[in-house]
Image: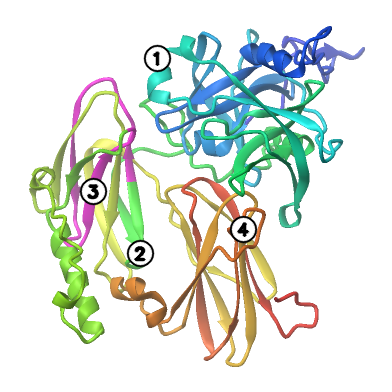
């Protein structure tokens, strides 16, 4: 995380009479219209220096230069850089390569890249968005529709886009204490992390996601500043995964040539990761469990390089078990293996459980491992000639009490968490899963359910009730439902993130018979 000690030599830092550092004063706003300049013209001029194009191997977005605790950083959305430890930022014809993710705030989807050093582009002050009202003019600046593959090597082709609109309304997410500016200013892919300005050129928010397919939502300036303050103080981002794009990039993970992966049930998926390197390599990887199914793919293109030869056999066995439980024949079900399996991909398995995979230069690999046929906890040991990173974090089941809310940080490689709650026959309870800026769902699972592949496929027919998108939350993607408890025991609430990005979720279970409860 970002250190809190500021070097006195930094530009704009002054000293008190006793020699101690004092906070620098905010710079004049370089985005303010000059003379008779129109606001959009002023922002186009300003964007050349202070609004950048952010890219990594899998995504692109927009960032804006700000000052934080005496240093200069690029501020963007967390989902733009997630889960990687570095990103490139282009200003005009100059690209700052491999800027480190200095810190993140999962709750508000904010990340800082840098620090940028003494030759940084001009920083923009973060202003107040709460002073805006419905009908006020606002402007979004960013890089919508740009292609990382096309423009990463041709920064001269990049040009920031300015779109205009009005404030439709201000929205509040009470659960997380956040406020958003809703505007009809155009937003699309690549705009995420871009600054929202008022007509005076003041930065009043950071755009994130679209709303109702017609509107943009921008986190209000005051809340952006609060997130920045939390990041520099080390109060947020402790669970950020920080995966290196290349060998030598910073990471909080330790590369290993051997390990053991633990699988709680058939739904578990574990990930190993090989960062990119300059030269071609051969990955020699072995796994021990004969029921494990392995898949190796490239990171940037998602191209499959290797698959376990047993994959078709496993899928056909699951199909047979489904038919058996339903009292039918496998022939009665759709053929899930009709697409076949490219035999070239199985040739990388030179003997059962032993793989030799040719790794292209400048390419990172994701190794996915599943054990679909288990009905109890299992382990898979692995060894490799090249050091690998384990991306899936081992998290124990969490107890959850009636009336309690628990916050949980998801990362892209660990998108589910289990909570156990003791309930009594005849109770009426409400389960509520929500997130400030994402999409969550949950399964409510009876005490007697065995989580094997067949049960997970059949879902509600086998004692699992799945709840998703109940029109709750700012995007309507939260999940909320009441249940009448039919038997006494320990129930499992499996919380999911549907986003595939780092995000904060909150889960609660409420006794609806409590006089203070607010069940629907």
Secondary structure found at label 4: loop
Specify whether residue 160 is painted magenta. no
Q: Which of marks 1 and 2 is in front?
A: 1
Badge 4 or badge 2: first in the primary sequence? 2
Point out the tag, 1 or 2, that comes first from the N-terminus.
Answer: 1
Q: Name the residue nearer the viewer: 472 or 165.
A: 165
Q: In this view, does 29 lie to the left or right of 55?
A: right
Label located before the other in sequence (1 or 3): 1
Alpha-carbon span between mark 4 and mark 3? 34 Å
Give the labeled residue for mark 4: 476
Using residue 241 as the reference point, say whether residue 436 is left or right of it.
right
In this figure, which residue is indicated by the disc labeled 2? Answer: 267
Kindly identify the residue that appears in the image at 82 percent across and 9 percent down. 36
Q: How far is disc 2 from disc 3 in space, using C-alphas? A: 16 Å
Tag nearer the camera, 1 or 3: 1
Residue 273 on the magenta segment: yes
CA gap between label 1 and label 2 equals 40 Å
Residue 361 pos. (x, y %): 24, 24
> Is residue 336 something that shows in the picture?
yes
| Quarter of the rendering containing residue 448 | bottom left
Q: What residue is disc 3 on? A: 295
Contact check, label 1 and label 2, Cβ < 8 Å? no
Density class for disc 4 (Cα within 10 Å; few <14, some 14-19, many ≥20) is some
Q: Magenta segment, which residues?
A: 272-300
Residue 105, can we see it?
no
Measuring from the top left, give residue 264's x and y in whole percent.
37, 66
Q: Earlier in the sequence, mark 1 or mark 4?
A: 1
**438 relative to 228, above or below:** below
* Label 2 neighbour load within 10 Å: few <14, some 14-19, many 20+: some
- Find the distance from the CA under tag 1 to the CA under tag 3: 31 Å
Q: Find disc 1 in the rendering and name its residue.
A: 153
């Amino acid at each position: 995380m970002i250190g809190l000690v500021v070097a006195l030599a930094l530009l704009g830092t002054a000293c008190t009479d006793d020699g101690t550092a004092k906070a620098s004063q905010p710079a004049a706003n370089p985005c303010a219209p000059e003379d008779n300049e129109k606001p959009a013209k002023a922002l186009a001029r300003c964007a050349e220096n202070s609004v950048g194009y952010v890219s990594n191997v899998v995504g692109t977005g927009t960032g804006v230069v700000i000052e934080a605790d005496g240093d200069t950083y690029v501020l963007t959305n967390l989902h733009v850089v997630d889960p990687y430890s570095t990103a490139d930022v282009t200003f005009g014809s100059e690209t700052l390569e491999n800027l480190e993710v200095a810190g993140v705030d999962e709750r508000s989807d904010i990340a800082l890249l840098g620090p940028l050093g003494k030759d940084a582009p001009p920083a923009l002050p973060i202003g107040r968005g709460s002073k805006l009202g419905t009908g006020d003019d606002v402007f979004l600046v960013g890089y919508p529709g740009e292609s990382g593959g096309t423009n990463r090597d041709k920064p001269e082709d990049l040009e920031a886009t300015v779109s205009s609109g009005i404030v439709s309304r201000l929205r509040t997410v009470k659960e997380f204490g956040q406020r958003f500016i809703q505007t009809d200013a155009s937003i699309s892919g690549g705009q995420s992390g871009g600054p929202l300005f008022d007509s005076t050129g003041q930065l009043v928010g950071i755009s994130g996601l679209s709303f109702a397919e017609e509107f943009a939502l921008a986190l209000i300036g005051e809340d952006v500043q609060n997130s920045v303050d939390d990041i520099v103080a080390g109060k947020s981002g402790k669970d950020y995964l920080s995966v290196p794009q290349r060998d030598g990039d910073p990471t909080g993970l330790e590369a290993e040539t051997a390990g053991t992966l633990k699988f709680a049930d058939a739904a578990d998926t574990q990930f190993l990761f090989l960062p990119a390197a300059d030269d071609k390599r051969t990955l020699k990887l072995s796994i021990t469990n004969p029921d494990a199914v392995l898949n190796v793919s490239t990171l940037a293109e998602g191209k499959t390089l290797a698959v376990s030869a047993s994959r078709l056999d496993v899928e056909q066995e699951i199909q047979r078990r489904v038919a058996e439980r339903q009292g039918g024949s496998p022939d009665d079900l759709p053929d899930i293996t009709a697409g076949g399996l490219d035999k070239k991909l199985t040739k990388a398995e030179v003997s059962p459980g032993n793989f030799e995979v040719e790794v292209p230069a400048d390419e990172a690999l994701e190794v996915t491992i599943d054990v679909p046929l288990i009905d109890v906890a299992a382990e898979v040991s692995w060894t490799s000639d090249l050091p690998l990173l384990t991306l899936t974090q081992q998290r124990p089941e969490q107890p959850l009490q009636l009336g309690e809310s628990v916050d949980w940080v998801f990362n892209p490689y660990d998108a589910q968490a289990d909570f156990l709650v003791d309930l009594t026959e005849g109770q009426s309870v409400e389960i509520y899963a929500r997130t400030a800026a994402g999409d969550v769902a949950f399964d409510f699972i009876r005490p007697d359910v065995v989580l094997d592949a067949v049960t997970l496929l059949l879902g509600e027919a086998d004692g699992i009730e799945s709840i998703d998108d109940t029109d709750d939350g700012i995007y309507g993607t939260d999940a909320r439902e009441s249940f009448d408890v039919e038997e006494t025991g320990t129930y499992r609430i499996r919380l999911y993130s549907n986003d595939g990005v780092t995000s904060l979720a909150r889960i609660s279970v409420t006794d609806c018979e409590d006089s203070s409860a607010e069940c629907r």
